[in-house]
Image (cartoon, rainbow, N blue to C red):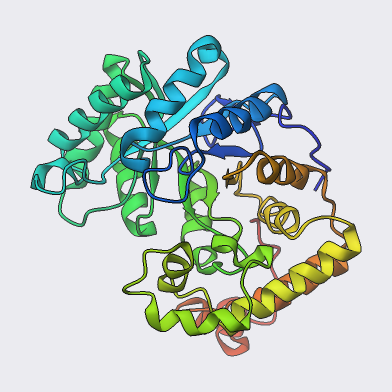
Amino acid sequence: MANQTLLNNYRLLGCSGLRVSPLTLGTMTFGSDWGWGADDAEAKRIFDAYVDRGGNFIDTAVNYTNGASERILGGFIKEKRERIILATKFTMARDAQNINSGGNHRLNLVRSVETSLRQLDTDRIDLLYLHSWDFTTTPDEVMRSLDALVQSGKILYVGICNTPAWRVAQMQTLADLRGWSPFVALQIGYSLVERTVEHELMPMAQAMGLGVLPWSPLGGGILTGKYSRADLSSENEANVSATRKGVIASSGHLNEHALAIADVVGEIAEELHASRSQVALAWTLQHPAVVSPVMGARTLEQAEDNFGALDVTFTADQLKRLDLASAIAPIFPENFIGRPMAQQLIFGKNTVAVRR
């Protein structure tokens, strides 16, 4: 892959003509309402550093830091609105006491968009994600409702997060058949400690025109060297701990295997004279489906370090070591079809060049 050195080395987002930066600025850390985010002043420094370097793709959600993220961001973007591709999300409940303030249904979708427009103090949302599949709303209701909002001009493009591949494919096909607005972006957890999305979600995205935006590309901080073997004991406390460590432990990723992967990241970071965060972020950009990893930062120093991921170039040996350390076992049907006997039954004694 060619070396990416600038945030203004823009890429197309999925099947759209929208041009976005190769790193997305995530703003779940804007606001201290959840106990660990950046205050307004530090958030402004992070925002300015990103935009001043040519960054144009900013990610938030209606519920991040109880709405503070959108409100803070709304003040920052006012003078630069036309330069910013603004993405937000709906699904998560805005009122824990109101059953209809969460979910993928039309009522919550419309109310969430109205709330985001107010909080962001803007006339449109450039990219609206469905934040998570709720396993209750029908695909027809979701896609029809999203298209109606596109037709109204309140949102311009649609994306989806945290949803099974078969469901995304069904919804994308439905949009194609009905002439509704298709998904152009897929935001999913993807990192050296979370590669299971390579089984179904990544190939689906490539086949169906969705640009992939990995969230938590640093593995919740595990790949930065933030945690050690001494922290493994916190896994037992994950269900009751509201700390950042407890949240990561509850994800199941804070384990011996993940720390072994982090060790390899550290070795390669030393070889490249780069930070561990830069190596972890740069690795996600090697996948052809990935458009723009979502980087989050609580300090300006963290943000500027993350920008340096665009200067990282791996050797073939370094990529191989990272791949071996983090490799995932194949699942059915790949683990059946990929066997020599099955391949011989399909292709005989011949070989076929496969297009990826």
Residue for point 17% across, 37% down: 108
Where residue 48 appears, as percent x and y from the top left, is: 63, 25
- The residue depicted at 55 percent of the width and 13 percent of the height is 80
Task: Tell me what residue is drawn at x 29 percent, y 20 percent.
Answer: 118
| Residue 110 falls left or right of residue 71 | left
> In terms of depth relative to the viewer, which is nearer, 79 or 112?
79
Residue 327 quadrant: bottom right
Depth check: 94 or 145 in front?
94
Q: x, y percentage for residue 3?
A: 83, 43
Q: With 227 as the anchor, is 166 left or right in this view?
A: left
Q: Quadrant of the C terminus?
A: bottom right
98 on left or right of 29: left
- The correct choice, above or below, for 151 with respect to 49 in the image is above
The percent position of residue 140, horizontal first and vertical second, equals 19, 41
Q: Give the percent coordinates (x, y) of residue 147.
A: 27, 27
Quadrant of the rendered image containing residue 51: top right
In the picture as drawn, the residue positioned furthest to the bottom comes out as: 341
Q: Which sits in the foreground, 277 or 287?
A: 277
